[in-house]
Amino acid sequence: MKKRWIAGLLTLTMILGLTACGQKKEETPAETQTETTTETESETVKETETPLEEGKMYSYMTGEVVDTQIGTQRPYAIMINNIGEALPQSGISQAEAVYECLVEHGITRLMCEFQNIENLSKVGSIRSARHYYMDLAEDNEAIFTHFGQSIFAKARIDEGYPTISGLSGYSGDVFYRTDDREAPHNVFSSRDGLLAGLSATGLTRDYPEGYKGRLNFYHEDTVPEKGDAANKVSMPFPDCSPWFEYNTEDKLYYRYQYGEPHIDAENNEQLKFKNLIIQYAQRSVISNEDHQDYTLIGSGKGLFITDGKVNPITWKRESAADRTTYFYEDGTPVYLNTGKSYFAVVPSELSVACEAE
């Protein structure tokens, strides 16, 4: 009888022990402990990252390591003529970012953003403003620079939008004309001219206090885990018919337009980019002269293309005071690879073609 009582007690003890282990495995404290460990490990990784040299920082524009005196300066956003009569262009291969949109009658205009202008001896040709480019310039806190403007851009300038303008009393210090092509395709500027424009307008290249940048960057080249092949990317812009071809050796996208490589006359270099960001937006025609308007406040679909792959994304900008950010379809933020980027606003009724070969 005593043996049976002892055996029963042992069995009960084993059952209680198993039940307790099972409860402990399911308890929140155990999960909390795991999460705490993970967070601690993550923080440790961040703390052990190799610090940058004194006087260096990661560029808000490219993610590259740059001198702090360069990286803390707002870029210039310069409107660049992109019709056949304006070619070849000068200085644009030095831009950290290039924006492209359709303007009137199927042509495009480029907005090239320059943070480092130290070696910018000639840039242009420079053309007139369009109001939606002014919205895009705000994304990177850029100093909008132009020669002329549409009536819709003028309305924003009259309301107080700060620019460096060719239609001003100081324009002779900033811009100059060449005699190798006809007006209005012969306006250019330079590092010294841009600095003169800064002085004349009283604008500052200092970022707003607390500025952190709107783009996320990997510090090491990272091929997207998902995505379809994108070795050739064709833009739906009828006049210049631009496209990009992926180079597997340097992992960059080389730009072509008008049936040939897109070349910078100053260094004979072809335009090339690490990242291509396509932003589909609702378009409307707002004048009898085919002036365009794009809905850039709100959200919409897009594409992120890098390292030979394309992935669908969503862009968001909740108000004019906000800046455009990019997310994958599952809601995680898009990280760009380090390097120069091309941004295009494409009417939502059109589509960008990505080909594997």
Image (spheres, rainbow, N blue to C red):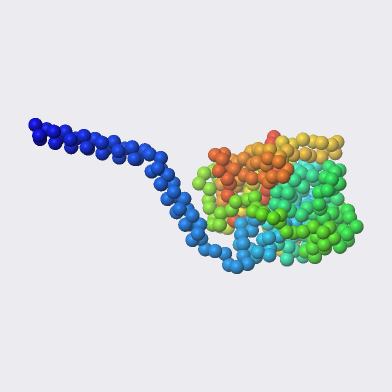
**Residue 299 screen position, x and y as percent:** 66, 38
Residue closest to the eye, 30 or 211 = 30
User: Within the image, what quadrant is residue 353 found in?
Assistant: top right
In the picture, measured across the screen, residue 106 lies left or right of residue 354, that is right
Vertical placement of residue 28 versus 247, above or below: above
Residue 169 falls in which quadrant of the image?
Answer: bottom right
Q: Is residue 245 left or right of residue 80?
A: left
Residue 67 occupies quadrant: bottom right
Whether residue 231 appears in this view of the structure is: no
Residue at horizontal 80%, vertical 60%?
198
Residue at coordinates 79% horizontally, 39% vertically from top-left?
Answer: 292
Up the image or down, 272 lies above or below 277; here it is below
Image quarter (top left, top right, bottom left or bottom right) of the N terminus = top left
Count of marks placed on residues: 0
| Residue 36 % position (x, y) | 44, 48
Q: Residue furthest right?
A: 169
Residue 337 pos. (x, y %): 58, 53
Between residues 132 and 271, which one lies in front from this camera angle? Answer: 132
Residue 219 visible in rendering: yes
